[in-house]
Image (tube, helix red, strand yellow):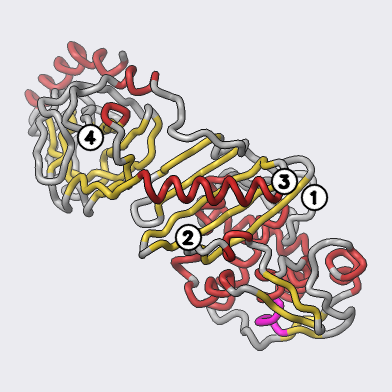
Amino acid sequence: MKTAVFRAEGQCLEKGRAFRVWRFAAVLLALAPSALPTLAGAQEATKPAIETAAKEVLLVDGETGTVLLQKNPDSPFPPASLAKMMTMEVVFEAIASGRLSLQTEFPISVHAWRTGGAPSGTSTMFANVRSSVSVDNLIHGAIIQSANDACIALAEGMAGSEAKFAELMNKRAEELGLSGSHFVNPTGLPAEGQHVTLRDLVTLARHVRKEHPELYKIYSQPAFEWNKIFQRNRNPLLSMDIGADGMETGYTEASGYALLGVTDRGGRVTYLAMSGLSTSRERSQEARRLLDWSDRSFAVRSLFDKGEVVGSADVFGGEALSVPLIAPRHIAALLPREAGERISAQIRYEGPLAAPIEKGASVARLDVLVDGETVLSEPLVAERSVESGSFSDRAMGAVSELAFGWLRNF
C-alpha cells in the first residue's frame, strides 16, 4: 500500500465542503481553519495529549470507532482473566445459534474444582465438586465473580476439555479478526503461549456488546451469590457512577493490573483497555482519569456525508485518468475539541488503480490522524465505473506512469 501526500486547495475538512486534490495518490487536509500541516510536521508532534502510568492503553469511541488515545495497543501480554471475554463470546455464540441452552447443566469435575474451585486459591464461584450447575449460573459466576471453576465447567461441558475449548476460542478469534491474540485455556490462568493485545480486546468487547446485548447486561450486575457465598462484581468502574456497564479485569505478575472497561455516558459509549499498572488502586484511578478526560476533551465532528466526494484516485489503462472517491456512509470522528494542526487526514490507496473499476468498489481509505497517528480509517468507494481504455488510452497511461509515477514514492 503506497501513500503519497499532497497539499489540498482548501483549508478545512468540514461537513458540506468539497475539496479538489492534486493528481497522483492522496490528500492531506487540516481539520481546523488554520494553515494546512504537512504529514512530516504532523508526525513530529508525537507527544500524547495526556500521560498515563499504564504501559499499554487503548481508548476508543464506541460510535465512530475513533481512537482517542493509544500507547502500545498491539503489544502482546498475558491476559489473565481478560481471556474470559473470549470464553464468554464462544458461549454466547453457541447460545445465539441454538447449540447451547441456558438451562443446560454441566458437572463440576474434580479438575474444575481443584484448578478453579475452592482449593485453587483463585477467583471462584465455590461450586461443589461433582455438582451440576446450569449454563445460566455458570455464566453469572464467570462474569460477575470471574470464576475459574465456572469457565472450566463450561469448557469441559461444551468441548470435553480445556484444550479442545481453547481450539474453539482461537477459531472464533480468527473469525473476528483478533490477529494478535492466542488462547490456551478458558480462564486466563498462566500458560505458555497465551497472549492478547489491547486492540483485539476492544474489538472483542465491541462485538460482544453489539451482537449479544441481553447476555452482555450480566456484566453490569453488581453481585452474584452461589452456594450461599455472596461476591461483588470485580469491575471497579461499576461503583464510580460514570456510566460503566462492563467488562473485565485481570492481573498477572508479568504484566501487572489490567482492565477492559465500557462506559455509556448519555448515549456516548467509550471503550478503555489498559494494562501494566502497579496496583489495583492505580488501575482504578487511571481508568477514571482517562475516561473523564475523554468525556470533556472530545467532540463528534461530521466529516463527510454518505455519497459525498472526498477526493480522487489515479487510474491506469482506463478510459479516464482518474475516478472520484466517495464516502459509502456518513463519516464522523470523535476529535479533540482544541487540536488545531495536530489533526490531519489523507487518502490512501495502492495505485494507480488498474481499469476496469466497478462503481461502488472499495478502492481506497480515508485516514484521519492526530499527532501523526491514525485514529480512524474509513473505506472510500469509486463514484462511477471506469472501463478499460483503448490502445491509445493505455499507451498514454503508461507514458504518464513512467513520467510521474516516481512522485508517489517520495
Task: Point out the stretch of residues depicted in magenta.
Answer: 134-138
Q: Nearer the viewer, mark 2 or mark 3?
A: 3
Q: Label 2 vs label 3: CA separation?
A: 22 Å
The answer to whether residue 86 is visible is no
> Element under label 4?
loop
Q: Which residue is labeled 4 in the image? A: 31
Q: Give the residue type at disc 2.
A: Thr
Residue 17 position (above or below residue 237) = above
Relative depth, front residue between 196 and 184: 196
Q: Give the residue type at disc 4.
A: Leu
Callout 3: 10 Å neighbours few (<14), some, many (20+)?
few
Q: Label 4 vs label 1: CA separation?
A: 46 Å
Q: Which residue is labeled 3 in the image? A: 279
Residue 310 position (above or below residue 152) = above
Q: Which residue is labeled 1 in the image? A: 190
Q: Are marks 2 and 3 in contact (CB under 8 Å)?
A: no
Q: Nearer the viewer, mark 1 or mark 3?
A: 3
Relative depth, front residue between 403 and 343: 343
Callout 4: 10 Å neighbours few (<14), some, many (20+)?
many
Q: Are marks 4 and 3 in contact (CB under 8 Å)?
A: no
Q: Give the residue type at disc 3.
A: Thr
Residue 96 position (above or below residue 174) = below
> Element under label 2?
strand
> Does the magenta segment cover residue 137?
yes
Q: Residue at x 56, y 49 (%)?
A: 287
